[in-house]
Structure formats: structure tokens, C-alpha cells
Image: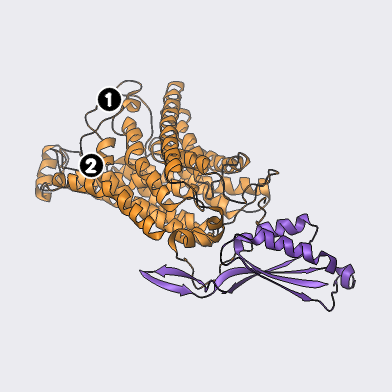
Chain colours: A purple, B orange
Amino acid sequence: MHMIEAIIKPAALDPVKARLASLGILGCTAMECRGFGKQKGHTERYRGGRMDVGFVPKIQLKIAVRSEDLDKAVDAVTSAARSGEVGDGKIFVYELGKVVRIRTGEQNDDAL
Amino acid sequence: MNATRIRWGLALSLPLWVGLAAASPAWAQDAATTAEAAAEAVEEGVSAEMFTVNNLWIMIAGCMVFIMHLGFASLESGLTQAKNTVNILFKNTMIVSLGILTYALIGFSLMYPGEWGVAGVLGWTGWGIPLPPGGQTSAYDAGYTYHTDFFFQAMFAATAATIVSGAVAERIKLGPFLIFIIPIVAISYPITGSWQWGGGWLSTLGGDDAGFIDFAGSTLVHSVGAWAALAAVIVLGPRLGKYAADGTVNPIPGHNLALATIGVFLLWFGWFGFNGGSVLTADAAAVSLVLTNTALAAAAGAVAAGLLAYFVTRNADLTMALNGILGGLVAITASANIQTPMTAIIIGIIGGVIVVVSIIGLDRLRIDDPVGAISAHGTCGVWGTLAPGIFGASAGVTQLGYQVIGVVSIAAFTLAFAFIVALAVKATLGFRVDEAEEIEGLDLGEHEMSAYPDFPRVYIKSYHTREI
């Protein structure tokens, strides 16, 4: 079991969600977040001045998947979130020790 | 990209400045003094006191119509998403300003030509607002001075344009929108206005004493704005995610219903000036009847829309009740001076019902109007214009015929004009922002600003259901 943590542009949220759903990967947590990378934030203007907005709005997705689904899920997020421009985001993958479905008590792969 | 945008802006504003410069000699004429005005008034058979009172009321009414622009700005920003707030407020700021300037430059002269180039259809007496021979006296009009006339009418003109801005919100490019709206307010609105208020062909349909009735502008102002909005919305297309491929309509909630409510109440307040001032004198009986009818129709519209929405959707929908107020107000505007309080209530109730049905119906047709402007001002404007053929002292088949002719001719002219301008702008500059900008918000895309920099932007929304 793996956790896919993807930082994506807000505009990519719907395409990613639709692509995952089409693969049968149902279940994901989305969070509003802000961050910066090589893009170093963006700038806004106010009363003639320019100001650095160091942290750009992004969306963080957390998707837990069975190990056999990992590659296709990562491919799905990558292709759906890619615009080709700076700021498309990053994907981090790490192993999960345990998963429990609260309603039934099912564990691990059964809970995904 | 920004430098390009600024250059475009400067280039496009050039005709305005050149025109203003060309018209400035006409504005340099001496204004008549108050004493002269009063003396003239006495000669014309209106007492100096009454002339002053009449004029004062129209000036106050004009100021009240002005506050409607704040009402529109509040309502439109309240009913749209937070990420587009700077954009919609900027549009409203520019519309009222460009509207007043262009109305001085060309619109007032087109709308009240005095002499016609094409009899009853098109007239033009020149640039600017030079004082006519009657000047600031009652020789010009027993009710008001020339400048009061201009001031009151200029506040109206910008109203028609502001109606468009709400309907096309959240997806239209800023520059192309302004380029689209200037000919609407400077040329199209005054031409159709001249057909009735300028003494043109609609006002004399039935000879010198009978014709089309549109007291304060259900058709001349409100429908004109709505027809222009309808053309623009059809050319633009709906917002992303509004209509799913399977036909589902996804509501996109406005970000601040408190602001929307403040806006509607300001509009209601301003409407007392809009209709009350349209009496064009301070005649006690006439103005008080108009104010009573205006208040009753708005109240009836709110109650009717609120109840209908409750029975259709089983929730007490604030936005529908607010639109009901506007529906009632638009509906009574054409005949507020000739209805009784009872018929005003009936007209308001029907206006409130129509606005709800129209909002739901337009969504079925996939015509995306974020603030319901086409329904409140267009559909209810048509109803209000037909109403004096059905209710009140003027009711009758002949009158109803005149009303239909007025509605259809002005709708046809405005739709044709607006479609041509919208398609021309779309073909040259593009009309709509790209998809990424629409999702990120027009505040950042068009303005590089946020309306609420100290609050988080919300991108994860329940209505993210657009087809990919």
C-alpha cells in the first residue's frame, strides 16, 4: 500500500479527479495549501506597487492505493495535472504501514 | 503581456479623448444665472418657486439613480465568486464612468435630437452638451434646467450598461468587455431611446396623442441592457462547470449574500428616484402615486418570488426573493404613473413569478447568467412593458399592440446591434479568458490583484463537476 501525495495547480483538480475515477481509484483527500518551488511564488500589484506573493495557492491531494495500482495512479495524476508550465507541482510517494476503514474495521488492502 | 494590454487601453481610449477635445468648445458657453432662470420661469407661467422645487426633485432623483450603480456593484460582486471580485468591481467602476462621459459626448444628443435625420428613427444634433436656446430656464422645460435633464438621463444611460456586466461575469476579458459596452451605451441605447423619449416613431404610433407607453424604461433601459447581455452571453458561452454533458445544472454560489442583499436594497432605494424622477416635475399627486406603486410592486415581487421558490424548491431561497424585488421593480417601471396601487401589486406579483420561472428556464436553455440579470431586467422588462396594455387606465387591445411593437422593435434592434459588436470583438480581440485563468480567477488573470488578500482563496468546491 502506498500514499501518493500530489501538489498540483488548482486548475488541475477536476482533470485529476476525473482521470482517477475513470481508473476506478475512488477516494482521495484534497486540501487547500500554499507553497513555492522553483517558480518562487508569483507577484501581484497594489496601488502601483508590485509585491511578491511568496506562496502560491496549490492543492494537495492524498491518495492511498494498493501497490498494484500505484504506477497507473501516478501516471494518471502526472498526465492529468501536466500543463507543461512551471508550477505544475510534484508527486511524493511513500509506503503505508497500516490502513483501517473506520466503519467496518477492515484493514489494509480490504480497506482501500 | 501587460505592456501590450496598457498600449491597447491607451489606443482604445484615444477616440474618447479626441472626441471630448472636439466637443469642448461647445461646453464653454456661459451658463445662465439662477436669477435669469427664475425670471424666465415666471414669464413661462411656472412660478419661480415651483421651477426650483421641480428642478430640485429631479436633481435629487438623479442622485438616487446614481446610487443604483453601487447597488449593481454590490449585487453583482455578491452573487459571483470571491476570485472575480476585483474584476466585477472594476467593470462597474468603468461602466458608470465611461457611460457618463460617452453620454455627454454623443448619447444625449442622439437620444433627444430635437430634429431628425431619418424622421422618428435617427437624429443627431452634434457633439457634447452645448446649452440650447432655452438654456437653464423654464423656456427649456417647466420642470428642470438643461443640465438637470442631462444629469438625470446620464445616470439612466449607464444603468443599461451595468446590467450587462453581471450577466457576462466570471469569464469575459476585461478590455473586450469595455470595447463591447461602449457602443451599446453610446449608440444603441440612445437610438432606441430616441424612438420613444426623444419623440420618435414609437411615441406617435397612434397619432400625436397615443403611442407606445414606457414611463421610466422597462423596455428602454432595462430590456435594452438585458438584450445586450443575452447577445453577449450567447457569444461567450456558459462558465466552466455550470452545465454538465448529461444536462445537469450545477449552481455556482455567489461568495457574499450579505453584499447581494445590500445591493438589492440600494437598487430599491434608487428606484424611487428612477421612477419618481421620471415624472419630470415635483407634481405632488403624480410623484406620490409613482412612489407608492414602486414600493408596492417591489414588495409584491419579493413575496411572490420567495413563495414560489419555496414551493418549487422547498427552501426559502434568499437569492430568488432578492431577484423578485428586482422583477417587481422592473415590471412596474413602464407604467408606475398610470396604475392604481392594486394593479401595481398585481404587476409586481406577476413580475416576481416570472423572474423565478425565467431564471430556471434560462438554465434549461444553457444560457448562463450568474446574477439573473437577463431574467430580472429582460423577461420582467417585457412583462412590465406589456402591462399597461392589460392593466390601468390605458388598457386595451390597441395599446397592447403598441406595446408589442415597442418590445419587438427595440429587442430586434438591440439584439442585432449587440450580436454584431460581440462577434466583431470576439473575432478580433477574443471575448473570453482562457480556461486556466477562469479557474484561477479573473482578479489575478486580468488585474494581478486580489479583492481579499488576507483571506485564503478557495479552489476546492462542491460544484467542481465539469466534464473533462
Which of the two residues, B62 or B299, is positioned nearer the viewer here?
B62
Who's the residue at 55% across and 61% down the image?
Answer: B440
User: Element under label 2?
Assistant: loop
Q: Where is residue B87? Give x, y as percent.
A: 45, 58
Q: Is residue B162 above or below residue A39?
A: above
Which residue is the site of mark 1?
Answer: B118
User: Gap between marks 2 and 1, in whole Å?
Assistant: 29 Å
Which label number is shown at residue B105?
none
Q: First in sequence, mark 2 or 1: give its number.
A: 1
Q: Where is residue B193? Give x, y as percent.
A: 34, 35
Mark 1 belongs to which subunit? B
Mark 2 belongs to which subunit? B
Which residue is the site of mark 2?
Answer: B143
Q: Is residue B303 visible?
A: yes
Q: Is residue B209 above or below residue B7?
A: above
**Quadrant in the rendering for residue B222:** top left
- Quarter of the figure that contains the N terminus of chain B: bottom left
Q: Is residue B66 visible?
A: no
User: Element under label 1?
Assistant: loop
Left or right: A79 in relation to A65: left
Left or right: B99 in relation to B134: right
Q: Where is residue B72? Give x, y as percent.
A: 43, 53
Amino acid found under the numbered disc labelled 1: Val
**Quadrant in the rendering for residue B23:** top left
Amino acid found under the numbered disc labelled 2: Gly
Left or right: B234 in relation to A79: left
